[in-house]
Amino acid sequence: MERVIALAGNPNVGKSTLFNRLTGLRQHTGNWTGKTVAAAEGRCGDYRLVDLPGTYSLLPHSEEEQVARDYLLRGEAEAVVVVCDACCLERNLNLVLQCRELCQRVLVCVNLLDEAERRGIRVDCTALSLGLGLPVVGITAREKGSRERFLAALDALWDAPAPPRRSPPYGQALETALRHMLCLAEGESLPARWLCLRLLAGERLPASETLRRAAEAERLDLGLTPAAVEDLLSAALSREAARLTALSVTGEERAYGARDARLDRIFTGKTWAFPMMLLLLLGICYLSIRGANLPSAWLSRGFARLEELLRRGFAALNAPIWLEGLLLDGAYQSLAAVVSVMLPPMAIFFPLFTLLEDAGFLPRVAYNLDRPFQRCRACGKQSLCMLMGLGCNAVGVTGCRIIDSRRERLLAILTNSITPCNGRFPLLIALLAMFFAPAGSALVPAALLSLILTGSVLATFAATALLSKTILRGEPSPFVLELPPYRRPQVGRVLLRSLLDRSLFVLGLLRLAALLDAPGRFFGLDGAILLAFLLGLPANETVLPILLMLYRASGGLGDASGLGEIHGLLLQNGWTGVTALCAVIFTVLHWPCSTTLLTVKKETGSWKWTALAALVPTMMGLILCAAVFSLTCQLR
């Protein structure tokens, strides 16, 4: 019999790591009905695990907290597992206590015991279990053996009858009010004591009119506002969490270890924070481009040998010349050129970038960018969405859900596509290497870093500031960011995830290029380039394959299996340094891919904001291209 288990926990407690270890590849992502918050579900033996959004509390102040609380209220889960960080147990216990008074079967999973031990913190899970009246299991999710220990504790939940729900003492005044209300709460659909507490706090929940009026009367008798009742509840939970921590945690509990404190002085300090950010990004760009030379040569030779075999096969089958030209001279050579030249640097860049995220560096980058976004009258959380956009703009748009304010969420959504996503990087690297710096030169990664800074960071700041002063006026909200500890990244998992997420697609078409040639020339481009970007709407990765096929169809080189050959093909079709510069600008600043646009529509519920999300980066790119082309024409 399948049992449904909900996984709850604060952000950065390793909940997703545990979920992935339990479910492996037997998982999928969906959306809660009527909500924009994504949920992951997976299977592990007889259990269906539901990974709830990371939340600090079931007293909802954000959509994530509301979704997590509503799911538990629906009663679909037969048990709840609350994952806690052993390094900051007291704060995590707040959520445990709230789940304990709402749900009957609760398992507390104390994770990251290895990090706690390194910091001199020891958690007595037996003492914690006795204090809570709940089963507690201690694990380190990424280590072997933790999965079996966790599943054994989960199986043991069903060996005993469900214990009664328990609540911490909320003080004499509230307890008296609760006793008066509980006699009226029989037959309600929600847990009686919990429902009475929430009604006292002024929350609108399904309840009889009699019970609602009783809650208002009791609150008036106490002389309290709903906010004051909320404060009393929060204070009682905090006291109980502190008491339980004193019972079960020993050793020197610190927010950061000595090593983390030293690293934070470098990566978040006033002097070194931004220089170190630049050096890290420059190092990633340099390793990606220089490290791609050897695998690029291997791929090029491999594709050439495969092409010989394919041509022999076509000859043996007496295939028509037009078919051989279409499949080999057109589609195959275009695909071979793009894969051999562009896939290696992309396959190096994104695993390296993901390793920085896994090690805890990217949250520090977001912390450093908070103040500039506040000056643009936006929320600092937008920096996290911008960083997500480097991987995929659709993911960046989805990530904007973490921003509570609708105004600030729209700012982040409309400007996210200014960030060049992974689909644009291969084309950028190729253009920089072919037209502006020798292949393998240190100038290429430096130029790529400059494009990231100008196209992603500075242009995002400019567009955000403009929108926040015009159609999306308002004041910024505070940004609360919990910096995770520096961790040794999980290299194997990161490489697998990063490499499997990248793919190339191939399309083809020609006639429309002539119609677009005149407007293309005005912006320093040509019709084929504009058409390639238009047809590349499904995925930015397809722009160069389409462009190569368009140029070959109009009469170009018969073979282009490497960077030099691609360069020759572009020169033969009228490319100059100015064309390449305008193409680089338009690669960074143009409309998002179709997946991102559909994600914007889903997030905003409006085609107006979707159109604006496409218009903002496109207009910036076209204006810059026209300005560069006009200036160079005047200088000649």
Image (cartoon, helix red, strand yellow):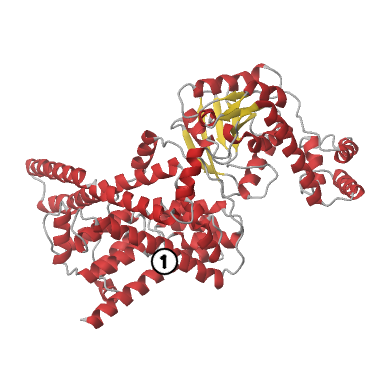
Q: Quadrant of residue 128?
A: top right
- In this picture, is 575 found above or below 166? below
* Residue 249 at x, y percent in the picture: 64, 28
Q: Is residue 107 left or right of residue 392?
A: right
For this rendering, which residue is in front, 150 or 457? 457
**Residue 513 visible in the shown view:** no
**Residue 567 visible in the shown view:** yes
Residue at x-position 58% and y-position 42%: 54
**What kind of residue is marked 1?**
Pro
For this rendering, which residue is in front, 488 or 522? 488
* Residue, far right: 221
* Residue 117 at x, y percent in the picture: 53, 28
- In this picture, is 368 found above or below 48? below
- In this picture, is 201 found above or below 490? below
* Residue 7 at x, y percent in the picture: 58, 34
Q: Is residue 329 left or right of residue 135?
A: left
Q: Is residue 29 left or right of residue 539?
A: right
User: Dot 1, crowdedness within 10 Å: few (<14), some or many (≥20)?
Assistant: many
Query: What is the count of numbered marks?
Result: 1
**Dot 1: what SS?**
helix
* Residue 277 at x, y percent in the picture: 40, 53
- In this picture, is 561 found above or below 115? below
Residue at x-position 77% and y-position 47%: 231
Residue hosting label 1: 617
For this rendering, which residue is in front, 258 or 321? 258
| Quadrant where the N terminus is found in the figure | top right
For this rendering, which residue is in front, 131 or 576? 131
| Quadrant where the C terminus is found in the figure | bottom left
* Residue, far top: 159
